[in-house]
Image (cartoon, coloured by chain):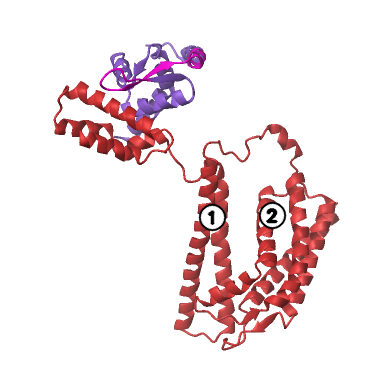
Chain colours: A red, B purple
Amino acid sequence: MKIIDQYIYAIGQKLPLKGRNDVKEELKSLLLDEIEARYGSDPSEEDVKNAISDFGSPSKVARKYAGERLIIAPGFTDIYYMIFWIIIFSMAVAFTTIFFVNLFTKDLAGAQILGEIGQAVLNIWNSSLSGIGMVTIIFIIISRFLRESKVDLEEDWTPKDLKGIPLGDEAESKIESFFAVAVLLVLLSVVNLFPGLLSFAESSFEKSGLLLGNRIDISLFSTYAIFLSLIWIGDLIYHILILKLAVKTKGLKIFRYSIDLAGIILLLIMVLDGNLFQINPAATMPSILGFKGIFMLVLILSSAEWIVSGVKEVLKKAEY
Amino acid sequence: MSEIEKIMDNLLQEMKRGTLVLTVLLNTDESRYGYSLVQSLQDKGVEIEQNTLYPLLRRLEKQNLLESSWDTSESRPRKYYRISREGRAIRDSLLKEWQRTNSLIETMLSPEDKI
């Protein structure tokens, strides 16, 4: 009967390619057995429809054969949610900062302020969606490749591993280093292979309707890129060692402080270099909005972090 | 259905699901096709949905616990399943574990719990 073939076809469309024909043939045979047992050898179309209806919807039947297919493998769920919230948090911080920069550098009043708030919220929403979408696609691809294997990031874990885990300030997060390595590799690639992406980012940003106060000089930035790369390679080495050792040794701490200090000095030089950030001729009034603002923000945060961790270290030593 | 009934229903389903593999392995010494196995199990009082049993047969086949073959000699081709050598070994182990668990539960029962 045609309806049986249509039903089996509909199920088949939802089954994995591997073994699909075999499942379809078997299902057809089983369904015919069922129909014959219930309605005899000459069933009416209504009987067949009843039997099919009792067998279940094509999706339900196919799901039983294919199993529950999760978009993201359970072993990656925690890390996915962590990145999910990092993206939202980062976008919220970035666009809130831009909002405040605009608030203090532009002559805004009344409805314009409300407009800026609306724009900030919209930007946070759009950029978070883009970021989460991209991350989700990556996780789906990873999960799909690992579909056949059991995904467990700590599969080989045994209680013996606890022995090597340091407590207190000596402990260092491997997850943090894992992401730092990934981000540093991306930064190194962008800065050295595609420096033009910075100009592209500036142009893309201006499409949102906001005018940048300054624009970066890519040829001069390429010179700075050499020094930036050296610092990031140092940072990369630090995080790789952390991943390997999982302990912040005294030598590593000094190494990290030195790299961070070098980074702060370099950022300071860059921010103060008048040729690196040229005033955007299209801007109606001077502002730091643009990469200069981002670099200044990073400089302030890095310096604060460097000082705070240095003070903490000194205080800790004083306790002993 | 009340909340308690829902919980009970879920727990019963879980319990039945746990015994399903053993049930199938105990009933496939002779070659059987899906529909005949459903009938045979129902005759023995095992309630099982076709849509649960058929995919289970394929899964057990994939795990090499069942062997399968198509019989095309009749007007309707049918896929027959039969327990494999590995399946028998697994069945024996599962059966021992089942009996052990059963004995353990027995020891936990108070006289009034025993039926």
The numbered mark 1 sits on a residue in which chain?
Answer: A
Q: Which residue is drawn at 46% across and 78% down?
A: A115
Residues B18 and A163: in front is B18
Residues A38 and A108: in front is A38
User: Residue B70: image x %, image y %?
Assistant: 36, 21
Q: Is residue A317 above or below residue B34?
A: below
Circle 1: residue type: Val
Graded by Cα atoms within 10 Å as few (under 14), some (14 to 19) or many (20 or more), the crowding at tag 1 reads some
Q: In this view, does A86 lie above or below B23?
A: below
The numbered mark 2 sits on a residue in which chain?
Answer: A
User: Residue A22: image x %, image y %?
Assistant: 37, 30
Q: Name the residue under label 1.
A: A135
- Does residue A146 appear to the left or right of B106 in the view shown? right
Q: Earlier in the sequence, mark 1 or mark 2?
A: 1
Q: Which residue is drawn at 50% across and 76% down?
A: A207
- Residue B4 in view: no
Q: In this view, does A275 lie above or below A245?
A: below
- Does residue B36 appear to the left or right of A212 in the view shown? left
Quarter of the rendering occupied by the N terminus of chain A: top left
Q: What stretch is highlighted in magenta?
A: B70-94
Which SS class for mark 1?
Answer: helix
Circle 2: residue type: Val
Hey, which quadrant is residue A91 in on the image? bottom right
Label count reads: 2
Q: Residue at x 66, y 70 (%)?
A: A195
User: Residue A29: image x %, image y %?
Assistant: 29, 26
Q: Mark 2 points at which residue?
A: A181
User: Residue A260: image x %, image y %?
Assistant: 77, 63
